[in-house]
Image (cartoon, helix red, strand yellow):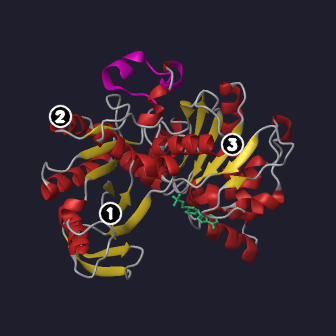
Amino acid sequence: MNILVLNCGSSSLKFQIIETDAEKMKKGTDRELAKGLIEKVGSDEAIISIKAPGNADYKVIKPLPDHKVALHCVIDWIQMPTTKLDGISSLKDIHAIGHRTVHGTETFNSSVRITDSVIKELEANVDLAPLHNPANLKGIYAAKEVFGNDIPQVGIFDTAFHATLPKYSFLYGIPLEYYNNYKIRKYGFHGTSHRYIGIRYRQITGKSIEDTNIISLHLGNGASICAIKNGKSIDTTMGFTPLEGLMMGTRSGDIDPTIIEFLMKKEHLSIEEVMNVLNKKSGVLGISGLSNDMRDLDKAIAENNDERSKLALEMYAYKNKKFIGSYLAAMNGADALCFTAGIGENSASIRKDICRNLENLGIEIDDKLNNEMTRGKEGLISTKTSKIKVYVIPTNEEIMLAHDTYNIVSGLEILE
Ligand code: AMP
């Protein structure tokens, strides 16, 4: 089955075409036929970049008023005489669409076939995810308009993996009426990535789902940690929104909420302006005063011994360490830590800093193995004697979207 996987942001559209079926899923032989990114959707200078094995790279800049026109560009590219995709000679060879959808609210605790009632439910709950779901809905509307009802569409939710959080873990210590009336609670995000890490960990180790007790660290520009006990998410650092938890590229992570009121008064800022500071100007960027990208900080330290960059890295590692400790307590111990995403997969020094001085908790990094592990590589980075194993596992959210889409369309259970 050829699946078009879509991930729509407010001004972007990412896509992949993945060939999968039950056999390929089992053997891990799914094929990525094409991959593309359309940036600046809604502008006169949208950038379309598509790569596909056996095809010349495609790069065009042109006006694209909305996501529907952007999706049309993808379809036009698929149908160009010069495009050669194995097994795809016309649009009919695209069999299903999988949409990355950030917020499933409490209604969608698993991936779901998109129907009119699903769309209505997502529209009704847009206030819970004002930054993400409107963009995801744009992708769903566009795909419906372009493909009609002939081709099945599936929604895969970032929050769904965390539907197993116990109530004592997902509730905030505020009056219960706010949960009952407005569904204010921890939802958690990056669930598709954390679920993939759990599945991949089982494939690597041969363990059963009941025996999957790991801490998954998704450290990218956005970052979250997930405590996975008996294969299920029991706690995670992001909360009602992706602002909670770890200090991230530009997001503050946890702060005392009183700071918001204090800042509003001191800096004469509106609530929207303070929220913008916490979402876009804080974290690694705010502390370093330089960049949200760890590579820039590494460079500034190497070239200028930059103190603020050093501080940002110290804080980054310390905050990760504290969550590892608290999740080890929440889970009564774990068998492994699994690092993933841009920083988790690439930065040996940050992995080392996070795991430094955790020997008494049974975590020991092997420097040689750690230093060899860069993007795309998967494997163990802990010492032979480390009680808790430490892995680097490159995440693959797109493959999860494709697998869930295949399973839902085929009437099969989705992989936990
Ligand atoms: P992601 O959101 O998962 O794509 O991760 C993006 C982030 O990964 C960037 O902002 C960088 O901070 C980090 N990153 C990517 N490559 C490297 C690298 N080679 N060394 C350190 N950090 C990296």
Give how far apart the Cα atoms at labels 1 and 3 are.
Answer: 32 Å
- Most extreme residue toward the front, as rendered? 23
**In the image, residue 400 above or below residue 9:** above
Q: Give the structural element (helix, strand or loop) at label 2.
A: helix
The answer to which quarter of the image holds residue 216 is: top right
Give how far apart the Cα atoms at labels 3 and 2 are.
Answer: 39 Å
Residue at 36%, 62% in the rendered image: 16
Please check the rendered image and state whether residue 185 is part of the magenta-colored stretch, yes or no. yes
Q: Label 3: few (<14), some or many (≥20) within 10 Å?
A: many
Q: Which mark is residue 378?
A: none
Q: Label 1: few (<14), some or many (≥20) within 10 Å?
A: many
Direction from residue 75 to residue 360 in the image, left or right:
right
Residue at 31%, 76% in the rendered image: 84
Q: Which mark is residue 12?
A: 1
Q: Which residues are magenta?
A: 168-186
- Residue type at mark 3 is Leu
For marks 1 and 3, the one nearer the N-term is: 1
Direction from residue 213 to residue 74 in the image, left or right:
left
The answer to which quarter of the image holds residue 187 is: top left
**In the image, residue 248 above or below residue 124:** below
Q: Which of labels 1 and 3 is toward the front? A: 3
**Residue indicated by mark 3:** 337
- Residue type at mark 2 is Ser
- Residue type at mark 1 is Ser
The reply to whether residue 392 is visible in this rendering is: yes
Please check the rendered image and state whether residue 2 is part of the magenta-colored stretch, yes or no. no
**Residue indicated by mark 2:** 117
Give how far apart the Cα atoms at labels 1 and 2 are.
Answer: 26 Å
